[in-house]
Image (cartoon, rainbow, N blue to C red):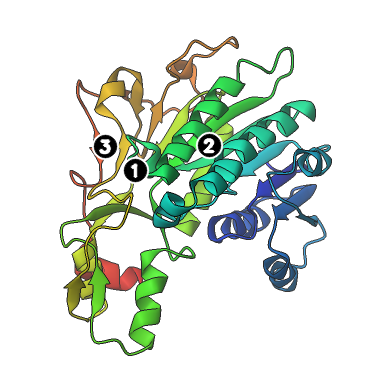
């Protein structure tokens, strides 16, 4: 899919974006691989980590449409990972999250259409499903923008799809590196919001591999959800060997997360290791995921089926320690 193609990753210096860079360079031979981000320090670090001639670096912000239009010139595929992502911070700075996660996503759509990019995938989150946080609401809006974009491309062949993930272990700002830092600082206990809280968990390597696979599978308009294990936050703290102190749920947080909603069971297809949620709206291009190239097609999920972090397979403390 990516051999001899031009690929651009927004937020390409972030935890997931840089892992996508690593995965593509290790498994494909792209003509160009463009890292687009605001972080010049991280870009410089990537230039020291990778020496591949196909790599290009663009300093820019997805809020800037003119810069995106320049960066998207002659690009075949776009992985859109750039976003503001901290749930509690979004509650206090909602306007900034709207500017990046919503307006910035619309800029990505317009730049992709303007430059006739072939395929674009938005990296979304389980927090976009039945959101109670500002962050989750912006990601739900971004998902809706991406699906609807398939109906505004006119005669162009640009296609837009969504890849919805859970928590990415080790990503910047997530709980695992936070706990690691506290342990290294010699704290007496680890703060947890609620002992019963559960989360989906996927490694950055697994996520990057799944995203690449989605480009082969996508027709435009669907939402891909990989099957993931869950963790109990209390078990995660136990894996670090420290006692816990309950500090209460932060603004915008849920006890459990959802990837596939029961209300959309009639649109949800289950495969061996992932789900596909078909678009709720009718698309103008010829869309029929049943004729997907994927030979592992199973069937629509059962009535009222919901894929959430509470009713799922959990990692045991021993497995969490191995992950750490």
Q: How many C-alpha atoms fall within 10 Å of the one at disc 2: few (<14), some, or many (≥20)?
A: some
Give the residue at mark 2.
214
Mark 1: give few (<14), some (14-19) or many (20+) Cα within 10 Å.
many
Image disc number at residue 227? 1
Residue 158 seen in render? yes
Cα separation, mark 2 vs mark 1, equals: 14 Å
Q: Position of residue 307 (x, y in %)?
A: 26, 37
Q: Which residue is drawn at the image coordinates 49% and 10% (left, top)?
A: 282
Q: Nearer the viewer, residue 246 or 1?
A: 246
The percent coordinates of residue 240 (x first, y second) are 27, 78
* Image-based side of 104 in relation to 257, left or right: right
Q: Which mark is residue 307?
A: 3
Asked whether residue 212 appears in the rendered view, the answer is no
The kind of secondary structure element at disc 3 is strand
Image quadrant in which you'd find residue 323: bottom left
| Neighbour tally class for label 3: few under 14, some 14-19, many 20 plus, Cα within 10 Å | some
As helix, strand or loop, the secondary structure at mark 1 comes to loop
């Amino acid at each position: 899919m990516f051999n001899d193609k031009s690929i651009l990753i927004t937020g390409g210096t972030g935890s997931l974006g840089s892992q996508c860079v690593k995965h593509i360079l290790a498994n494909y031979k792209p003509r160009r691989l463009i890292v687009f981000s605001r972080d010049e320090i991280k870009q410089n670090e990537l230039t020291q980590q990778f020496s591949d001639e196909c790599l290009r670096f663009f300093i820019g912000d997805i809020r800037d449409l003119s810069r995106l239009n320049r960066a998207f010139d002659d690009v075949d595929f776009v992985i859109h990972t750039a976003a503001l992502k901290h749930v509690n911070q979004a509650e206090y700075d909602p306007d900034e999250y709207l500017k990046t996660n919503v307006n910035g996503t619309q800029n990505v759509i317009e730049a992709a259409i303007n430059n006739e990019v072939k395929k674009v995938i938005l990296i979304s989150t389980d927090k976009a499903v039945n959101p109670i946080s500002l962050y989750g609401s912006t990601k739900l809006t971004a998902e809706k923008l991406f699906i609807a974009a398939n109906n505004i491309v006119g005669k162009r062949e640009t296609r837009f799809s969504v890849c919805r993930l859970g928590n990415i272990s080790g990503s910047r700002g997530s709980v695992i590196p936070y706990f690691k830092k506290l342990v290294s600082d010699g704290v007496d206990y680890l703060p947890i919001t609620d002992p019963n809280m559960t989360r989906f968990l996927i490694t950055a390597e697994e996520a990057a591999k799944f995203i690449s696979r989605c480009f082969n599978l996508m027709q435009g308009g669907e939402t891909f959800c990989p099957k993931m294990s869950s963790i109990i936050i209390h078990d995660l703290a136990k894996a670090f060997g420290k006692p816990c102190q309950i500090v209460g749920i932060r603004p915008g947080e849920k006890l459990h997360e959802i990837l596939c909603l029961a209300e959309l069971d009639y649109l949800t297809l289950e495969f061996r290791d992932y789900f596909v949620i078909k678009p709720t709206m009718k698309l103008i291009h010829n869309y029929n995921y049943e004729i997907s190239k994927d030979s592992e097609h199973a069937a629509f999920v059962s009535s009222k089926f919901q894929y959430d972090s509470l009713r799922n397979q959990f990692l045991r403390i021993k497995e969490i320690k191995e992950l750490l």
